[in-house]
Amino acid sequence: MSDARFVNQRMVGSSVIPDEAIPLVEGDGRFLNDIKLPGMYHVAFLRSQHAHARLIAVDASEARKLPGVIKVLTGQELLGKVDPFRSMPNRFSGGESIQHWLAVDKVRFCGEAICAVVAEDRATAEDAVDLIKVDYDPLPAVTDPRLGELDGAPLVHEACANNYLIKREYERGNVDEIFRDAHTVVKRKFKIGRKQALCLEGRGCVAGYRENTFTLTVWMSHQLPYVVRHYLAKHLRMAETDVRVIIPHTGGGFGQKASIYPEEFVCAHLALTLRRPVKWVEDRIENMVASTHARDQTIELELAADKDGHILAISSDIWVDVGAYSTYLWSAGMEPLQTAGLMPGPYRIGAMRYRTRGVATNKTPVGPYRAVGRPSASASLELLIDEMARKLKLDPVEVRLRNLISEEAMPYRSANNLVHDNVNYIPCLKLSVLKSDYDRQRAEQREALASGKLRGIGVACFAELTGLGTSTAVGPGTLLQPGRDAATLRLETSGVLTIAAALPSQGQRIMTAMRQVASDELGIKLEDITSITNDTATAPYGFGTFASRTAVFGSGAVIMAARELRKRLLAMAAFLLKVPVEDLTIVNSVIQTVDRSRSISLRDMAEKSYFSAKDIPQELNQGFEVTSFYDPKFGSFAAGAHVVVVDVDPKTGHVEIVRYVATEDVGTVINPAVVEGQIVGGIAQGIGEALLEELVYDDAGQPRTVTLADYLIPSALEIPRIELHHANTPSAALGGFKGCGEGSIIGALGAVACAISDALSRKGGDIHSFPATPERVLKGLGVLPGDA
Amino acid sequence: MAREQQIKLTVNGRSYEKTVPARLSLADFLRDHLHLTGTHLGCEHGVCGACTISMNGRSARSCLALAVQADGAEIVTIEGLRAEDGTRHPMQQLFLENFALQCGYCTPGFLITAIELLRDNPKPTEHEVREAISGNLCRCSGYQAIVDAILAASRLELA
Amino acid sequence: MKPAWFDYYAPHALDEALHLLGDAGHDGRVLAGGQSLMPMLNLRILSPAVIVDINRIEALNRLHAGADGLTVGALVRHADLLRSPDVREGWPLLWEATTQVAHMAIRNRGTVCGSVSHNDPSAEHPSVLVTMGGTVIVAGTAGHRELPAEAFFTGALSNALEPGEMVVELRYPRQPTGTGTAFVEFARRLGDFAIAGAAAMLTIRDGICERARLTVVGMGDGPLRLRAVEEMLTAHALGQKEAQDAFAEAAAMVVAAVDPTDDVHASAAYRRHLAGVMAAQALETALARAGGS
């Protein structure tokens, strides 16, 4: 056996079993609700029972008398002491909205916090909440955006005429002319229901007073520790350096824990004024009304094509029911602007127009949730492409192949001004078609139909812009840009490596990914690398985890820091071993000459450098600690193509997914098993969106889905086995990585929707409203009266 | 007196005697009074399954039982699955190796449910596994890795 | 969300429990499996002053299959029925319905009597009891009384219990030979409360339907027995073609007879449609199991 060369087994690309999961599987996770501090009080909130009402009086006298109650805080008492949330400036804003942490004169949605009760324990706090009397003067509620935008409709915010929190019109190309001259025009109205992230763990915080050296320490179930710190300090009028934010284990985020909400800020205020730690844990009933909702679009979409099915232009009119407030940080523009702006997806579309609005209603605010806007946009376009294909008697796969942006056409600037490059749209579709044995599926579909069974096949392709750098705003029109994130690499005194970054993981195993990347860059064994995150006192600055960016930014920053650290390590080793630096390499945590004749372990070298550095020149001994910031500047497109087969029961309307094939391009893969988990998990949430999940309000703005028996997320029986394939191509980002957390949910909604539509169309029916509840399916088939 | 009661029970092989409020749920008792925070609360109305524990040998929602009802009971939580020497239960090991958890919040309930399933039905089909865990909700994984971990355990002859 | 305060008692004898319940009157609640009561306590939908936990009363933990019928005591869990070969063999409708109750952890604790007492319109057990012509044994400080199933259920989430009374036992008669049964239900996810369901029981002799029972689930007021359908089917020949026509007619009669309400999972119109579909499915399956076509 030749051992002339020693090469580490590459860690990037290996399904390394993540050490960080061990405490979770052994019951030793430390989630927010597991934190206890001596003398800690508990908080419960009194919430509005009305969708829209003037607050005439709040009488907490009985509550204050209850033994065990420490304090009842009202909105009036907070006035002037803290700064309320004002909607972020946005170019497309319809007017400023102000959200008090606790309602002052008015409540604007069912579930809005009115009072905070502090008590010795949570049950007592809830007892006290029941004793508070609120005198409401009900106002007419806005519950339908199409009615809310009419002149004379009741206003949710006086400053927002026609209830527009956001409004934008956009046109590229001569859309009217293209539509006038086009061979084929198809047009349809789609409705995508209101939903929410439904993290298994709700939000929550523990706010501590004078823990360690910080005036305020806040443990929070959140995705963005540094952003929270910045805004806590700003709104509480404190120095940022007096505030520490720590993110414990987090039971799901999905964007819902990326916004800033009033409750945690109220708790911080309470800890400061009571000089005692307080805890608030959002229960499920609160979570259904007090944490952001998502989607809820009405999309009127029109498509012009030539006789061969090439898309020439699209035009859309979009209404989003964005709820009562402009979600803090992100604005109300998330769903309205992204649904409209990202409509072209992976297709060559030279001209587009949209009119989009976010209309304020008396409902829970809409905020970021996994793949904001794109699933609704993509599903609408995919359904309309199928309709066009049926009209032109083209196969859904063929029509997509004719329109996808090919590798040869890249870089390609789409009508929405985004540039597509280094992305495998066509290979993804071809592989899914091959792996699903598409032609055979079509043959089996015909046989099924002949024997009286209703089967449908859906094909959906998507583009997902991941890892956005400083050149792209997170929310179009906002000032907020994701910027840069840092990682610190430190070789400890015993020669092991610590990576620190403020990039929380809610199961994405970011710590493991960064260890894998560092191991390859530095030749340090994986078991010699540890990672700390999530604490503003110990990790360098980072924007946090959202928008499929964390692995891209974290890995990029690790690579940059590792390259500098590697230089320092080799320089010192060259001095100690008295060999030219070019002869050295690092293998398995040992620095050695390529011929292995001379070597020094990192342990020995670290001890020398930290403890016995008398003979080492100062310029060589700068310290083995490097912090690097990474900014990819632009985003990278990821892609996917899903093929789904469904059986529809024409008697009950039940939809069963019988086959699910997905191919994705997520760039260079760091940990394949982790990536697969992200993709399959995203597909499951997309299936939920397609078939089950919908938040329902009545006409008075009362929520009707406030428990997990009303709001249905998929169980193991609704999710089929997902057959997953890859057509990856590296991005231009450092390491070739792309984000993979969000893309698959886009393909899932579209592919399942198209499959159901395909089945119904065999009986002359169709469906344009989702989720495809059994009832809507039967309406689509004409079995029950009404529109679907 | 009727609002408080003394209870004696065994949790993970250890006996406890405590006085508890009658309205305290078994889940809150385990978490707040015994500091066994591995059991998680996801809904407190019996749907999500995150709080599932083993009570007298059978899986139960600890949010739907009162602590006082556990008087005399034998309870096993996720913290009690490890062997005395600290070795992970094979089901825990297979969840880890199959990447069957992401955020980990639902994991305690899945482990208890999966172990009970294989005790009752050592060689389940994939569909039987999916049916058995359909009362436990996971929002991250899409269930595939969980199903694979349980099927892998069924091949191990856990007994 | 935590329950409000209540006084808790866990008596060891039925008499003691009945006295506690009698004293509490409208303010008292029986706690058995807790799978319906506990969510309502946690959500503070209910805040009873007194909870009487009957789990310590050994005498109520009785499951007995005898020549004259099946006795199910107030502490018998859904899972106990599923583990009983006697029940599976002799009371297949009850067994099949129980397999569709919620999920394993719920079935391990929830009781059959509790489900019957609670009378959720979407629950399985009330309909099974009605279909099988079972009896409810009720106890109070004034003594025991027996109620035929249909007299016990008095509307959604209500029953014929007086304040201070509780269900101590259910009795299910044996089914006649030549009987086939089926319980079917449709929910958006398995284990959820049904949008609609049906329990059917057909006794077939020489191709003729000697006796028919049909009850639908999920229709608002609790178990709804379709006497008109039963009469139509009785003495009907149920060969393949006849059965097809008869069951189509049965489904149409069900659709005309039910008066469901809207909720977040289904409109009244969809529920009504589904009741017909479920009824036809249950009848077809029951017939096949009775040895008919």
Image (cartoon, rainbow, N blue to C red):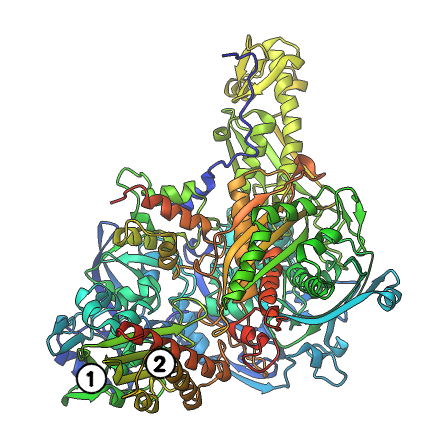
Residue C188 badge: none
Residue C135 badge: 1
Foreground pick, C7 / A187: A187
Foreground pick, A436 / A75: A436
Q: Residue at x 42, y 55 (%)?
A: B106
For the N terminus of chain C, give its image quadrant.
bottom left
Residue C73, quarter of the rendered image: bottom left
**In the structure shown, which secondary structural element does the residue marked by tag 1 occupy?**
strand
Q: How would you rate the neighbour count of disc 2 (Cα within 10 Å): few for under 14, some for 14-19, many for 20 or more?
A: many
Foreground pick, A390 / A349: A390
Q: Position of residue A467 (x, y in %)?
A: 67, 46
Q: Amino acid at mark 2?
A: Ala
Mark 2 to mark 1 CA distance (whole Å): 31 Å
Q: Position of residue A26 (x, y in %)?
A: 37, 45
Q: Amino acid at mark 1?
A: Thr
Label 1 chain ID: C
A364 over B129 or under it: above or below: below
Q: Is residue A7 left or right of residue A168?
A: left
Q: Position of residue A556 (x, y in %)?
A: 66, 37
**In the structure shown, which secondary structural element does the residue marked by tag 2 occupy?**
helix
Q: How would you rate the neighbour count of disc 1 (Cα within 10 Å): few for under 14, some for 14-19, many for 20 or more?
A: many
Residue B95, quarter of the rendered image: top left
B140 over A450 or under it: above or below: above
Residue C243 badge: 2
Label 2 chain ID: C
